[in-house]
Structure formats: C-alpha cells, structure tokens
Image (cartoon, rainbow, N blue to C red):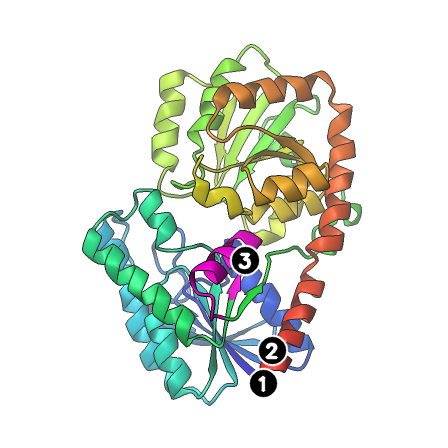
C-alpha cells in the first residue's frame, strides 16, 4: 500500500498538524505502508523560509524514514487577506506541479485547512491514480466566516462550493472530532465519513521518564508558585483576552502566574493589553521545539485551554489537551461540548469555565488555589483517560484497518 500525505504544514515546523501527521506517517510506515509527504518549504509561524531551506536547498529529504518532497511557497509577514490567499494558492499551484512528477499511489490524504489545497489534491489524485482521503481538522470555511476572518461573499461562496466538491470526490472524509464528522455526515449523507481523532504518544509524553525540569528556575518562578499555562497558537479562535482579564482580577494573589507560550497574529495585541492593564502576573514566552515540551509541561500546574464562545467550537478538541493530560497536567477548559464531555465529565481531569467569561475563570482559579492537592489527582485521571482513548498507536492501527478495507 502506498500513501501520499499532502499538507502545507510539516516538520521541522512546530505545531499541531505538523506533529499529528508526522506521528501518523511513522506509525503507518511500521505497518508496511509506503508513506511519502508532499509539503511546503517550512516557514510557519514566522512566515519566513527556515534556515537551510532557502534557494532550493533540501527540496528532498528523509525525516524519521519518511520521504518528504517540498514545493515552493509564497511567504509574507503581512497579515492582509491578500497575502494569506497568495500564501495558500501559491502552494496549491506548486504542490500540483511537484506532485505530478511522483510515482503512483493507492491513497492521497490531504490535510484541510487550508481548504484551497483541495484543488491540488483532487487534480493529483487523478494524476497519480490515488483514492482521495480528505482529512478535516477544522470546518473551513464555516469557522473562518463565523470568526470574521473571511467575510467576502464571493470568496465564501467559492469556498463552500469547493468544500462540497472535495467531500463528494473523496473516497473517505476523515474528521478530527466527532462533532466534525457528525456535521459533515448530516450535510453530505452520501459521503463516507470516519472519525480520525488527534491523540498523543503516551511513551514520549510520560512524566515517569523525565528528570526534574529546570523550567521554573530558568524563567524566574518559585517552587511554590501556581502556574497556569497556555501553549500554542496565539490567534483569533482562542480568545486569549479572557486570561488577561482574569489575571487582572487575581493580581492580589502573588503566587498565581499565567504563562502564554507561543506566537501568532494576536500576540502583539495581547502584549499591548498586558501593558495597558499593568499585569505583572502575565508572562509571554517564545515557542519551543517539540523535544522541549515534556519538560515544560512537567514544570507547570494547570493547562489553560480556552476558545471563543461560538457554537462552532462545541465539537472542537484543541490538540494541546492531549499532551498536557499525558503529562498528568489537568485542564482548566474554556471549551464547551465534546471536549468538556470527554475530559471534564468523563475523565474528571480538570475544571470547566464558561468560554470568554473572565469572572468564571478567576473564580475557578481561586477554588483550585484553595485546594492544590486536587491538581495531582485530576492529572492522574487525565493520563489514564488519554492512554485508553487517545493513544496514537491505537488510532493508527484503526486507520490502517480502514484503508485496507478501501483498497
């Protein structure tokens, strides 16, 4: 069996889709699948081609035994919609012209978003005689429309038509959450839909395998400090302002600190808000490589996972949930719906607060601070739950079985 993964984002970039797809590729390869990846020159999130890949370097490489083919892409530091569309469509074009030179494949799995990559995926699946698997990690363009990121009616109409065409052409549509798969199945009842959840490598993220982390001392925190941590994209969907407004209400609690580690389009605005509110308990840190994350998570107390208060996110499970829980770090979850049912109600691995409600968040933190021993108990519940239900090994095994049935 031969599988081509088409994605705009892949290691050495840091991020959820990058890690998820690479981990899946490695596991499918272990089952005997010949996996190759067609992706862009690494540039995310700084929107600058990474060192060592400029001027045509490393267009072909092996990463952990996976053959990776790289195509050119337009990058710009501009945040305008025009620059973003040029970024997406440049890779649509170059990925097709690079991919058409590859050998035949049995399957082509394309990662969406960006949805526009569906153009290249449909053309390449025909050219390479591959069955199309359309993997949806976010319902686009619906999410872009409801977040106000895209409001041009012409672009939205074009995107919704493309979405329908991709689903109808696919031999299988995979969704990252049960909410995504249910939404697609309801709108496109003739489409074959399969839940392909995100998950975690429970051996890699295992607190029992680590020495004591020096994260606190390096960043000026005391052993007695209570650290609430957000790590990931600092973007529109997360609604991270709620953390800063809650922090303002908790300034009197000198041992409570909030860490926001990552980068993204909203970071500068949040840093300005921190200065405006004079928040001494908010700390911005730069993103780190995947290899450093277990030690970071080992050192913090609670993982903050917020999203904006939109019906769209009822079916969302942010990827950062899995690594935190595997490291026995409980959640303070500002996401209702599917994530709340799994990790708060079933797993009892943390606490829920109403999304975008700073008062509810600060009240929850005060309760946690009063009884810090419950943090450890919730963390152990979390690792047990993701080990049983979101183990990457099990997820890959189930997908391999499904691919075999489609062959």
Q: Circle 1 — which element?
A: loop
- The residue most toward the top is 252
Q: What separation in Å lies between label 1 and label 2 (alpha carbons)?
A: 6 Å
Q: Is residue 353 left or right of residue 96?
A: right
Seen in the picture, residue 248 relative to 331 is either above or below; the reply is above
For this rendering, which residue is in front, 200 or 109?
109
Seen in the picture, residue 333 relative to 279 is either above or below; the reply is below
* Residue to which mark 3 is pinned: 176
Seen in the picture, residue 407 relative to 311 is either above or below; the reply is below
Q: Is residue 337 left or right of residue 401?
A: left
* Residue to which mark 2 is pinned: 403
Q: What separation in Å lies between label 3 and label 2 (alpha carbons)?
A: 17 Å
Q: Quadrant of residue 160?
A: bottom left
* Residue to which mark 1 is pinned: 407
First reached walking from the N terminus: tag 1 or tag 3? 3
Q: Are marks 1 and 2 in contact (CB under 8 Å)?
A: yes
Q: Residue at x 66, y 41 (%)?
A: 343
Q: Circle 2 — which element?
A: helix
Magenta residues, as a range? Answer: 174-191
Q: Are marks 3 and 2 in contact (CB under 8 Å)?
A: no
x, y (%) of residue 285?
49, 36
x, y (%) of residue 381?
77, 40
Q: Quadrant of the N terminus?
A: bottom right
Q: Is residue 184 magenta?
A: yes
Q: Circle 3 — which element?
A: loop
């Amino acid at each position: 069996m031969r599988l081509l993964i088409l994605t705009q984002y892949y290691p050495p970039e840091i991020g959820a889709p990058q890690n998820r797809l690479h981990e899946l590729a490695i596991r499918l390869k272990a089952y005997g699948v010949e996996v190759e990846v067609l992706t862009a020159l690494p540039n995310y999130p700084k929107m600058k081609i990474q060192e060592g890949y400029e001027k045509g370097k490393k267009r072909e490489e092996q990463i952990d035994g996976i053959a990776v083919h790289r195509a050119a892409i337009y990058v710009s530091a501009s945040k305008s919609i025009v620059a973003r569309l040029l970024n997406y469509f440049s890779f649509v074009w170059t990925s097709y012209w690079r991919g058409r030179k590859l050998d035949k494949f049995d399957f082509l799995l394309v990662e969406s978003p960006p949805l526009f990559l569906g153009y290249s995926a449909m053309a390449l699946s025909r050219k390479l005689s591959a069955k199309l698997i359309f993997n949806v990690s976010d319902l686009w363009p619906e999410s872009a429309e409801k977040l106000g990121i895209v409001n041009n009616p012409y672009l939205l109409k074009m995107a919704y038509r493309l979405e329908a065409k991709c689903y109808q052409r696919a031999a299988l549509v995979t969704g990252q959450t049960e909410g995504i798969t249910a939404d697609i199945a309801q709108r496109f009842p003739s489409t074959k839909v399969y839940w392909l959840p995100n998950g975690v490598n429970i051996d890699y993220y295992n607190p029992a395998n680590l020495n004591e982390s020096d994260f606190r001392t390096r960043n000026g925190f005391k052993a007695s400090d209570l650290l609430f941590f957000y790590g990931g994209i600092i973007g529109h969907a997360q609604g991270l302002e709620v953390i800063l407004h809650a922090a303002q209400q908790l300034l009197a609690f000198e041992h409570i600190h909030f860490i926001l580690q990552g980068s993204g389009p909203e970071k500068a605005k949040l840093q300005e808000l921190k200065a405006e509110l004079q928040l001494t308990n908010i700390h911005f840190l730069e993103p780190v490589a995947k290899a450093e994350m277990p030690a970071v998570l080992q050192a913090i107390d609670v993982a903050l996972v917020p999203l904006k208060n939109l019906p769209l996110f009822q079916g969302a499970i942010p990827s950062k949930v899995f690594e935190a829980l595997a490291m026995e770090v409980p959640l303070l979850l500002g996401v209702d719906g599917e994530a709340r049912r799994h990790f708060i109600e079933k797993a009892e691995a943390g606490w829920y607060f109403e999304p975008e409600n700073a008062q509810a968040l600060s009240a929850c933190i005060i309760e946690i601070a009063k009884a810090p021993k419950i943090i450890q108990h919730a963390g152990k519940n979390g690792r047990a739950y993701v080990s049983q239900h979101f183990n990457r090994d099990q997820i890959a095994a189930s997908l391999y079985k499904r691919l075999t049935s489609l062959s």
